[in-house]
Amino acid sequence: MNVGLCPRPAEHPGALHLLPGGALGQATALFGHEDAIVGGADRLGDTIYVGDNSAFSSEPNRVAVATVGDTITPIGLFDVYDPYAIVAVEGGAIVSSGFGDELIAVNAEGVLDVLPSELPGAIALGPDDLALVAEVSGVRLVRLEGGALVELGFYDTPALEDMIGSLGAQP
């Protein structure tokens, strides 16, 4: 079953949609308001993590967690400032909070751990659930282990012209 993130259709604002065969199917509201803007999302197995980083809403930024099967079932919703990028890993997800200068580990119950970061941006998932996080001055390598974020290294790019804009991982 495909999942579509359609945060602003008129009939289902702020909803997650199942897209069977490419057609708009079931819609499930994840954030409880119509001003949600999807900042990042990722799925592992039947669990999807979706971030709302709307700067125009009176509601706080949040991460919603849902299970996806024949239906969409919300199982968690909690405040996370500016969930810009998300990668789902075994045991939860790693969230890049750009304006919060943090990497945040989450699962369906809420926030597990927080690691300070310098203007984190995009996240790519490498082998063995190794997360590569683009920061203003380099790439940070982190992994979620037993509910804790473990920093495994930092590749420094000190020159302004070497700033990381995006990244990817190849098996």
Image (cartoon, rainbow, N blue to C red):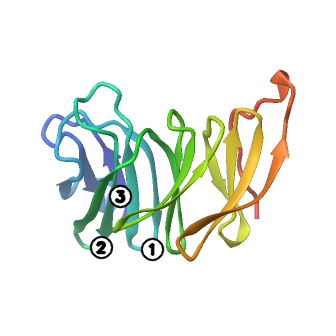
Label 3 SS? strand
Residue at label 1? Answer: 45
**Who comes first in sequence, dot 3 or dot 1?**
3
Q: Residues within 10 Å of mark 2 (few under 14, many from 20)?
A: some
User: Local crowd at mark 1 within 10 Å, few (<14), some, or many (≥20)?
Assistant: few
Residue 119 sits in which quadrant? Answer: top right
Q: Are marks 2 and 3 in contact (CB under 8 Å)?
A: no
The image quarter containing residue 138 is: top right
Q: In this figure, which residue is indicated by the disc labeled 2?
A: 69
Against 49, residue 71 (above or below) is below
Mark found first going from the N terminus, 2 or 1:
1
What amino acid does circle 1 point to? Gly
x and y percentages locating residue 66 in the rendered image: 30, 64
Where's residue 127, x and y in %? 72, 68
**Secondary structure beneath label 2:** loop
Residue kind at label 2, given as amino acid type: Gly
Q: CA distance from mark 2 to mark 1?
A: 10 Å
Q: Residue at x 38, y 52 (%)?
A: 50
Residue bearing mark 3 = 3
Left or right of 113, for residue 79: left
Mark 3 belongs to which amino acid? Val
Q: Residue at x 50, y 74 (%)?
A: 91
Q: Earlier in the sequence, mark 2 or mark 3?
A: 3
Q: Residue at x 23, y 67 (%)?
A: 73
